[in-house]
Image (spheres, rainbow, N blue to C red):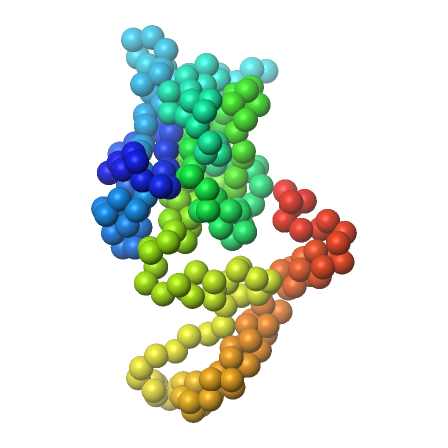
Amino acid sequence: MTAPFAPWRATILTLYPEMFPGPLGLSLAGTALARGAWGLEARDIREHGIGRHRSVDDTPAGGGAGMVLRCDVLAAAIDAAAPVNDPRPRLLMSPRGKPLTQARVRSLSAGPGVMIVCGRFEGVDERVIAGRTLEEVSIGDYVLSGGEIAAITLVDACVRLLPGVMGHAASGTEESFEGASLEYPHYTRPRDWEGRAIPAVLTGGDHGAVARWRRAESERITLERRPDLIARAARDEDGDGGGEETRR
């Protein structure tokens, strides 16, 4: 599972290391992992737990439901996994984090890797977020049972962009969210299916016409489904700072 000297490495801090590699051990990511194109290490936070029972959480200060991951336990786990000279960004999967974007994924995939903390319970003691400079990241406006599935999502998005992972270089650039639009529709054989035919322009052999059709379809779908992408791109072009950095 681990490839410690791979050029891009993901270290996951979790209470459930058995959840890894999970889907990351299959398909494109799994093939690349097996040949050492990237490395994965899942570390058990409970190894740094307190006392005979390896306690990792406690009741929230000020009262309230649930439990909170202790700052001393989590800090010890982070220090063991990513010492001060580790250049990788330290991420915390959190529903209150900055939304993960394709631009951020591309930036992370171009670096040395990531160290990801998977939260559980009601959350993480705020002091360790500041004390260990954790960047909070969200994969959507909903709440999961823990950060593991979110971490798998982030790592998969990064790994597929690593050199040689995808079979066709254009696969990483001609898709949704690489620009300010969603991807155009795709078709393949059979040419006719249940009374629905492949658009004639795609089978006519005119590559210029195909490119224009795909661009128009991309714009149409984006306008129908995600007009916010178009509006955000317009704000960025105007230079008013209304891009992804301001989204919460």
In this rendered view, identify the residue nearer to me: 223 or 235.
235
Q: In the figure, residue 13 lies in which quadrant?
A: top left
Residue extending farthest top: 51
| 218 relative position to 56: left or right | right
Q: Quadrant of residue 73?
A: top left
- Residue 246 percent coordinates (x, y): 67, 44
Q: Indicate the position of residue 2 as horizontal and vertical percent values.
A: 26, 36
How many tags in the picture? 0
Q: Residue at x 65, y 63 (%)?
A: 230
Using residue 22 as the reference point, say whether residue 246 is left or right of it: right
The N terminus: image quadrant: top left
Report if residue 12 is visible in the image: yes
Q: What x and y, as percent, mark residue 45? A: 36, 23
Q: Residue at x 39, y 63 (%)?
A: 169
Q: In the image, 121: left or right of 2?
A: right
| Residue 20 appears in the rendering | no
112 w.r.t. 232: above or below: above
Along the viewing direction, whichever of 222 and 67 lies nearer the viewer: 222
Q: Position of residue 81 (x, y in %)?
A: 37, 25
Residue in the picture at 55% in, 20% down? 131
Q: Based on the displayed image, in which of its 4 quarters is residue 226 positioned?
A: bottom right
Q: Quadrant of the C terminus?
A: top right
At x 39% / y 78%, what residue is drawn? 187
